[in-house]
Amino acid sequence: MLLRQIKYFQAVVENRSFSSAAEACHISQSAISQQIKALETHLGTTLFDRHNRTFSLTPQGEHFYKKSLVITSDLAKLEQETIRIARGDNIQLRIGYLKSYGGSEFQDAAVAFSKQYPLTPLHVMNGNHEDLYDALRTGQVDLVFNDQRRVFSGKYVNLELATTTCYIEIAAHHPLAKLTEIEIDDLKNTSCILIAGKNQQQTEQTYYHEIVGFQGDFIFADTLSDARIMVASQRGFLPIEGIKDSHHDSSSAIRHIPLLRNGSPVTKNYCAFWKKENTGFHLEEFARILKNRFR
């Protein structure tokens, strides 16, 4: 009974309304009001200051709400772990994603999957293209979200997700930031910042020099955050994908500029890859959710 009252109390706080909380909990407004009253009686204190049609939390109500979230989170985890043990269910999903990708689709898919399948833990790693390819090939991950650099292999499911325009990120006070589009050749005197660990730096440099066509110097960062700090400090430009459009907000320290080759946008294909032999329900569900995020 106490746990149910706590959940009703949380619903009232989060919906900022007794009537909305009642609707969310599928009970009447009078019933949820009675349960809150009973909880306050049990605690011997008021949790809300009521003001005609509005209310606010009392100091003790604020404290109770914050601590109750920890309790209900711990109980939910305990419930999930107990069910998994009882079922002998050790299912988990190991996913890899491209750390230079600037969009939110992967993160949104991970959140949606975890909400829908809370008993299936997600273990996530990131890397550049070759890191992810090696992790998938050697069985360290079950599925990767990666850019396409190779011809599709028949050993894998190759789920095409999107073709996106490539951008560069450059410091807002850099002279090139005034451009609305930029040709690859116009960057030959500006350093290209790539995100790669030491063991992948040469591979990434070769790809961006020989395949993409950047002709200037290359410097490296370990993470997207590190790379953006380097951009903001005018050390070079960062090629990035997954940006929906260019941004020219004068308050931003970084500009996104579409990248062109001979007047045409440079694009890149993104896919989800997994071994055909590993196909299973939860893996396919994650792939389906990820695909929907790109739609």
Image (cartoon, rainbow, N blue to C red):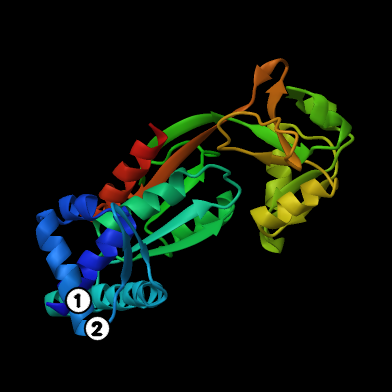
Q: Quadrant of residue 42?
A: bottom left
**Left or right placement of residue 63 versus residue 244 in this view:** left
Q: Which mark is residue 39?
A: 1
Name the quarter where the N terminus is drawn: bottom left
Q: Compared with residue 157, is residue 179 higher up or lower down, i.e. above or below?
A: above
Can I make out residue 70 in this image?
yes
Residues at discs 1 and 2 in contact (Cβ within 8 Å): yes
Q: Residue at x 20, y 65 (%)?
A: 8
**Left or right placement of residue 284 versus residue 204 in this view:** left
Q: Residue at x 24, y 83 (%)?
A: 43
Q: Compared with residue 111, is residue 238 higher up or lower down, i.e. above or below?
A: above
276 vs 13, nearest the viewer: 13
Name the quarter where the C terminus is drawn: top left
Measuring from the top left, give residue 165's x and y in whole percent: 59, 28
Q: Which residue is mark 2?
A: 43
**Left or right placement of residue 39 versus residue 167 in this view:** left
